[in-house]
Image (tube, rainbow, N blue to C red):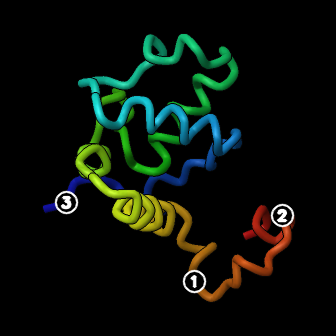
Amino acid sequence: MDTEPTQEQRSVTPPTMSPVTFRNFTETHRRTLPGRIDRSLMKSNSGSDQPKILAGLQFIGLIEPSGKPTAKFELLRDVETDEGLKESWQNLLQEAYPKLFQGFDLTKATQSQIEER
């Protein structure tokens, strides 16, 4: 039985941060995935970015509230190709943001439409 909560069950507001900051952090740590993701890994990130990164990782389902990486993060760690990484991120984002991918043309949306959705 899958005990991981669904996106609706989490009902967490997605964090707002630079996608580059988030990507850089995950790419830096995905290959050497530690047993816990916490602020000690974020010394090069600003104090305001650190909680946003943690919230983003939890929102997407890559870490548990305790900081322990989930099976999703472990799968992301094991991706070898750029195409595989692209597909993995696509799946993670579609699961985390279902309203943006179902019956909504993201390619033609304005920033306001995305935020409303």
User: Relative to residue 96, is residue 101 drawn left or right?
Assistant: right
Q: Check disc 3 and report the residue beneath it.
A: 2
**Residue 11, image x and y in percent?**
53, 54
Most foreground residue, 115 or 4: 115
The x and y percentages for residue 66 are: 34, 27
Return the residue at label 1. 102
Residue 6 visible in rendering: no
Name the amino acid type tagged 1: Gln
Residue 26 found in image quarter = top left
Location of residue 47 with respect to 52 vertically, above or below = above
Among numbered discs 2 and 1, the one appearing first in the sequence: 1
* Disc 2 packing (10 Å; few <14; some 14–19; many ≥20): few
Circle 1 SS class: loop
Front-most of 11 and 66? 66
Q: Which residue is mark 2?
A: 111
Label 2: element kind: helix
